[in-house]
Image: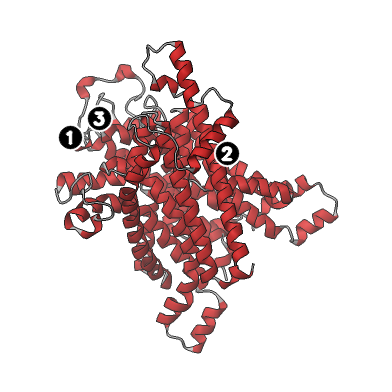
């Protein structure tokens, strides 16, 4: 099961929607990496803001309108997108890493290690993920690093469970048996023999989880326990606009929401296709 | 069967015990409630006395033991804000939350499964593609934003439905009156969208896998009509994993009512927990978390037991 093979890529490209998703995500990542390229102002720089510009509807000067402080919503959305994507990607990277290691140890490491790790997972899954993240953030307080840690803590379980399941069946495969007979160290078998062979499902979960992590961050920020408003994410921008949404200033929360949705949709489109392409059970 | 059941119940109890320890530990670390309970000009002596009466001068394990002992009697302390037993405060608001969550789950199941089946039969058709795109949008849209937009469109702009609140009719009576339903529609739709999309997608992918199985081919070869192949042979086996997810997702739904209730000012536990977190009302937060954990574990237990009835393979293991 090679991931980077040209066949897989070709199959992926057959789905136009998935390609559209990939292009959209790429555009979002580029814009988020250097928002100054297209932004008309630096939304964090209070000196460039003019209170006389506050609550302007979308126009030629302010493409998506302005907020209560006269900040250009278009620029704020670009910088907010960066925060949202950083939270999504970084937390997914760490949770998949932790989950992969935990799943390998549980599946291959043997009895008591398996019991301890899976009990941990059980306990964590006995409360809804969203609630765990909410309580952690409510007690710990707002912060970018904090929310990344909180989401990582909440998500590793998903990878660990799946990886463990696959490792249990992979254990009896010839290549593992051969490595064992060859006297390889168990850690070597885990990480250099088994791990590369189970990356496909990990990647599939990871795409779904990036989308979830971005939504989770936005929801927590909306409830006021996410990232601080001084460096707002898309979620905090929506939250900020919510206060005046029904006074007619709809653009402040509608546009960040649309961008958030578009990015998550793009990731999900790719994830959907990746799952079909990498799932051998559907190919017969 | 009895051994299986008792081991499952024992497992559930261990999990609940562990959750209670985690919740208590987090709350213990979160800070000293004495400062919040006493007026700011309280003397050192008063603080010491308060500590003693609340048992906060004891070491962690003794505090936890006392907490556990009281919790087993249904007493997790008095709410700092409401002055009542925290558990009572939570339980009073629970029916409103369950009402909202069950309305959302009902819609999600009764729309999600048929749509999923429809999309699986002819996956290349435009209808199927349309359904799948809708479901993908459903899992991509942030719940809270969806709620805001629905209020903006249907309550503020069109004025068709009330923007917030709940008709005061008594527990679970919202379903039986026109007024009750008008209040329920927007929050329930908001809450249900993600679950609907999820159930739809699971049903569809489950059906796609099952329809490739040999026994389906056999049924078709025997000349069983398409309708009954889909409805009986395939759907029956697809539903097994879907039921598990419905069970797990009902717990997630209860958690997500926090968001929906905040937006729609729905007087349930979700709004209560957000207020309590802001007011640092620890006993209520603990009571809420324990109630949710109990509901969650109970649902999982019920799903596991249901499994043994639906899927004969589980019974053998």
Disc on the earlier residue, 2 or 1? 2
Closer mark to the observer between disc 3 and disc 1: 1
Quarter of the image with the N terminus of chain B is bottom right
- In the image, is residue B129 above or below residue B211? above
Callout 2–callout 1 Cβ contact below 8 Å = no
Res B225 visible: yes
Residue nearer the viewer, B50 or A278: B50
Q: Earlier in the sequence, mark 3 or mark 2?
A: 3
Q: Position of residue B62 (x, y in %)?
A: 58, 31
Q: Could you classify mark 3 by the number of other residues whose Cα lies within 10 Å: few (under 14), some (14-19), or many (20 or more)?
A: many
Residue A223 in view, yes or no: no
Q: Residue furthest left?
A: B159
Q: CA distance from mark 2 to mark 1?
A: 41 Å
Q: Which mark is residue A247?
A: 1
**Residue B213 drawn above or below residue B146:** below
- The answer for how far apart the CA atoms under marks 3 and 2 are is 36 Å
Q: Is A163 in front, or is B98?
A: B98
Q: Give x and y (percent) for residue B228.
A: 42, 81
Q: Residue B269: x percent and y percent?
A: 35, 43
Circle 2 crowding by C-alpha within 10 Å: few under 14, some 14–19, many from 20: some
Q: What residue do we see at 14% from left, 49% from top?
A: B158
Q: Earlier in the sequence, mark 3 or mark 1?
A: 3
State yes or no: discs 3 and 1 in contact (Cβ < 8 Å): no
Which residue, given by chain and number where applicable, does mark 3 sit on? A66
* Residue linked to disc 2: A94
Q: Quadrant of the C terminus of chain B?
A: bottom right
Mark 3 falls on what kind of element? loop
Q: Chain of mark 1?
A: A
């Amino acid at each position: 099961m090679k991931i980077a093979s040209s066949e897989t890529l070709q199959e992926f490209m057959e789905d136009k929607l998935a390609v559209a998703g990939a292009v959209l995500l790429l555009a979002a990542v580029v814009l988020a990496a250097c928002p100054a390229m297209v932004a008309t102002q630096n939304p964090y720089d209070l000196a460039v803001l003019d209170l006389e510009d506050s609550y302007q509807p979308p126009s030629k000067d302010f493409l998506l309108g302005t907020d209560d402080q006269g900040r250009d919503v278009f620029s704020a959305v670009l910088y907010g997108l960066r925060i949202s994507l950083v939270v999504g990607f970084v937390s997914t990277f760490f949770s998949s890493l932790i989950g992969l290691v935990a799943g390998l140890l549980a599946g291959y490491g043997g009895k008591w290690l398996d019991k301890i790790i899976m009990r941990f997972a059980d306990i964590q899954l006995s409360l809804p993920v969203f609630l765990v993240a909410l309580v952690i953030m409510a007690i710990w307080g707002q912060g970018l690093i904090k929310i990344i840690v909180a989401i990582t803590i909440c998500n590793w379980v998903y990878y660990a469970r799946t990886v463990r399941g696959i490792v249990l069946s992979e254990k009896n495969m010839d290549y593992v048996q051969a490595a064992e007979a060859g006297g390889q160290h168990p850690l070597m078998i885990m990480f250099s023999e088994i791990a590369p062979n189970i990356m496909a499902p990990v990647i599939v979960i990871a795409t779904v989880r990036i989308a979830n992590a971005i939504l989770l961050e936005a929801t927590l920020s909306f409830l006021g326990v996410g990232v601080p408003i001084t460096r707002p994410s898309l979620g905090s921008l929506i939250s900020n606009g919510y206060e005046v949404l029904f006074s007619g200033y709809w653009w402040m929360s509608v546009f960040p929401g649309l961008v958030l949705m578009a990015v998550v949709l793009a990731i999900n489109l790719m994830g959907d296709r990746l799952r079909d392409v990498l799932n051998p059970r559907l190919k017969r | 069967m009895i051994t299986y059941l008792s081991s499952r119940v024992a497992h559930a109890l261990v999990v609940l015990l562990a959750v209670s320890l985690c919740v208590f530990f987090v709350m213990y670390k979160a800070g000293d409630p004495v400062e919040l309970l006493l007026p700011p000009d309280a003397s050192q002596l008063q603080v010491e006395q308060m500590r003693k009466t609340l048992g906060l001068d004891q070491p962690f394990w003794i505090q936890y033991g006392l907490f556990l002992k009281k919790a087993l009697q249904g007493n997790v302390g008095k709410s700092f804000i409401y002055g009542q037993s925290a558990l009572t405060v939570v339980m009073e608001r629970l029916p409103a939350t369950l009402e909202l969550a069950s309305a959302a789950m009902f819609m999600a199941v009764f729309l999600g499964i048929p749509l999923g089946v429809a999309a699986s039969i002819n996956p290349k058709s435009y209808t199927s593609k349309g359904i799948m795109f809708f479901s993908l949008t459903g899992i991509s849209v942030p719940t809270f934003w969806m709620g805001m937009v629905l209020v903006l469109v249907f309550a503020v702009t069109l004025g068709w439905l009330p923007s917030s609140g709940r008709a005061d009719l008594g527990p679970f009576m919202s379903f039986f009156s026109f007024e009750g339903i008008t209040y329920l529609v927007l929050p329930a739709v908001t809450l249900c969208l993600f679950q609907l999309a999820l159930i739809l997608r699971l049903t569809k992918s489950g059906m796609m896998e099952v329809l490739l199985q040999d026994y389906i081919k056999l049924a078709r070869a025997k000349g069983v009509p398409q309708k009954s192949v889909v409805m009986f042979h395939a759907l029956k086996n697809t539903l097994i994993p879907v039921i598990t997810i419905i069970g797990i997702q009902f717990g997630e739904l209860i958690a997500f009512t926090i968001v929906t209730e905040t937006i729609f000012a729905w007087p349930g536990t979700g709004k209560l927990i957000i207020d309590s977190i802001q007011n640092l009302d620890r006993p209520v937060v603990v009571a809420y978390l324990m109630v949710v954990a109990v509901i969650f574990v109970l649902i999982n237990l019920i799903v596991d037991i249901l499994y043994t009835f639906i899927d004969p393979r589980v019974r053998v293991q």
